[in-house]
Amino acid sequence: MSFTLCYSQHHTRKPWIGRVVKLLIVGNSGVGKTTLCQCLLSVPGSDLKLHDGTATSHQQFLEDPESLCSTVSWDDNTDKVKWVYKVQDTPGYGDNLNIMNSIHLLQQYVERQNKVWLSVEMDKGRGVDLADVEDPRVDLCLFCIQAHRLRPVDLRFMAELGKVVPILPIVTKSDSMTIREAATYRREVYRKLQNPQLPEPQGSAALGGISSAINVFTFEDATLERAGLLQFHQSQTVPPFLVVASNDLNQEKLEGQEAVFWPERRYPWGVSEAFNPHHSDLLHLRLLLLKEACDELSSAKRTRYTQWRQRELAKRMRRRPGRRLLGLLLPVLAGFVIAKTGFGSRSTARALDDVSHTLHLPKITVTSRNDDVAVEDTKHSSIPSVTQPDMEPAKKEVRPRDKKFMGIFL
């Protein structure tokens, strides 16, 4: 009799993981934020739902920011990653006379997303793995700048917002500039981002001037090269990106045998094509943000969040130091009083329970075993209990001297 042994070969399959990239798009009113979002995320055959960018109110952003958020997703079969890409639109800051109100609105939004993720991390009863929770944190801010002129208010906005999230400056409607004007303006914006030299605003001494470089996200040269940017520009002048965006599409390419999403702007003297590298940086910017730099953005976000988390937890620890100190000393003090005074365990329990409830401290219980009175802290178990020597258990009412010592806690 012969036996044939069959060996089953086990192939380890890499599990799919979900990754979220969230962009915050900011700029003056009418600069083309919504149109840029449309061109970044749309593909042939997609029905990307966007809100009307002409009516983006601060109240809507406060009450329901998700209504201003556009989302696309795709699967990376090579790395087994399901990417979710979100672009959060914001109200134009030109509609607000006080620019600091708009700055604080966006700073608080970024901080709020970090706190949401921190609460998820610290929730022991969430029941799901963090990898299965959608990440609300902001990776990058796309800051739209108008062509021809970089205003001091734009530098102020980028400097203040850059304290909580890195900035990626984008010059929109760049087809309104000639080739020479575009090259000159690109160098000017780059120089002012590195050295703003913004004086202190009149009547706002608390703001101060801006002399240090603005927090602009810097991509690695290898990432820029994969996106095809170094073939047209030097890495020293990118960013800013000069883009052309449009809601008008080339119908011939869209309805051809292979549908191509091709935005363009038609003029009497010619056509400006949004995805033509000689006309606009939009095609390379789209490839950079949606493919080549995804891992780089996620890694930078994790590093930035770790630093924020340390500061936030340290801030929370400094809020109520007296209560924590009292919570540590109270069990020791209670045991010392019991050992010295010897009043009954029931009155001791009532007194300590009243104190713990009033000061919102960990509950302290008093148990009696073999005529011994012991103090026990249910939270700080490392504090030793203090036991009373053998003596007759108290059976009468609390003496006046006991009430005096009870006043220590009340």
Image (cartoon, grey):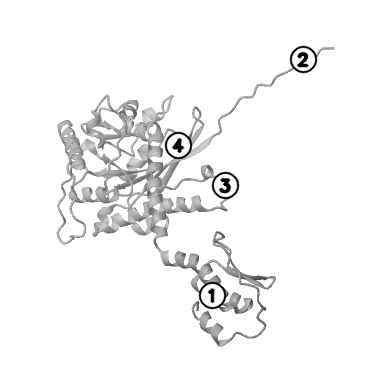
Crowd class of label 3 (few under 14; some 14 to 19; many from 20; radius 10 Å): few
Mark 4 vs mark 3: which is more N-terminal? 4
Q: Which residue is mark 2?
A: 4
Mark 2 closeness class: few <14, some 14–19, many ≥20 residues within 10 Å: few
Q: Earlier in the sequence, mark 3 or mark 2?
A: 2
Mark 1, residues whose alpha carbon is within 10 Å: few (<14), some, or many (≥20)?
A: some
* Residue plotted at (19% across, 55% down): 208
Which residue is more in the foreground, 78 or 119?
Answer: 119
Marks 4 and 3 sit apart, C-alpha to C-alpha, by: 32 Å
Q: Position of residue 55 (x, y in %)?
A: 34, 53
In the displayed structure image, the side of residue 74 where residue 399 appears, left or right:
right
Residue type (three-letter) at the residue carrying disc 1: Val
Instruction: Measure the C-alpha gap from mark 2 to mark 4.
Output: 55 Å
SS for callout 4: loop
Q: Which mark is residue 128?
A: 3
Q: Determine which of the numbered discs, if any, sits on residue 46 in the image.
A: 4
Looking at the picture, does residue 408 appear above or below residue 259? below
